Image: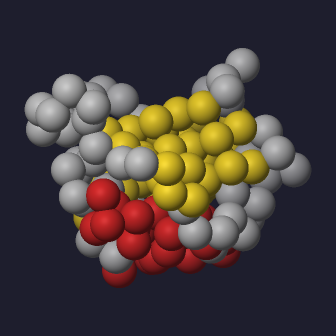
Amino acid sequence: MFSHVMLGVNDLEVSKKFYDAMLGTLGYGPGVANKNRYFYRSPTGTFAITTPINGEPACHGNGSTIGFTVQSAEQGDAFHAAGVANGGSTCEDPPGFRETPAGKLYLAYLRDPDGNKICALHRPG
């Protein structure tokens, strides 16, 4: 459904360090530079960070969440830990399994250095 997701950031290099570390736990290489942006590509889509092209400060969307698929709870824990160790902050409940109307899910929430809400999600088989 989606070709890409792009988030506005205020300090491109601080955010690159955060996303390089966190996405590295999922097997993705460092962001690839293109002007004032970094791109993280996968076979199924692209995630990118950018400084806003209008010159205004970036801000997070209240109520917005960007979710990344992880293959296990352990990978989700590593994703979350890498994010916190690189300028992110934990939010919501601690990482772990939750019973939801959609079934049992592993979820790990954090905020990036600009306050964007990020989630690692695993659906056990």
Q: Is residue 52 left or right of residue 65?
A: left
Whether 38 is drawn above or below 22: the answer is above
Expressed as whole percent of the image width and height from the top left, the position of residue 21 reads 50, 74
Decide if residue 88 is in sight here: no
Q: Residue furthest front?
A: 35
Report the quarter where the N terminus lies: top right
Whether 69 is drawn above or below 103: the answer is below
Instruction: Report the colour scheme.
Output: secondary structure
Q: Residue furthest bottom?
A: 85
Q: Residue at x 36, y 48 (%)?
A: 36
Whether 67 is drawn above or below 26: the answer is above
**Residue 23: quadrant of the picture:** bottom right
Q: Residue at x 53, y 33 (%)?
A: 5
Decide if residue 53 is in sight here: yes
Expressed as whole percent of the image width and height from the top left, the position of residue 66 reads 48, 39
Q: How many marks?
A: 0
Q: Is residue 106 left or right of residue 45?
A: left
Q: Residue at x 64, y 41 (%)?
A: 46
Q: Residue at x 15, y 34 (%)?
A: 55
Expressed as whole percent of the image width and height from the top left, the position of residue 76 reads 60, 65
Expressed as whole percent of the image width and height from the top left, the position of residue 35 reads 42, 48
Whether 56 is drawn above or below 71: the answer is above
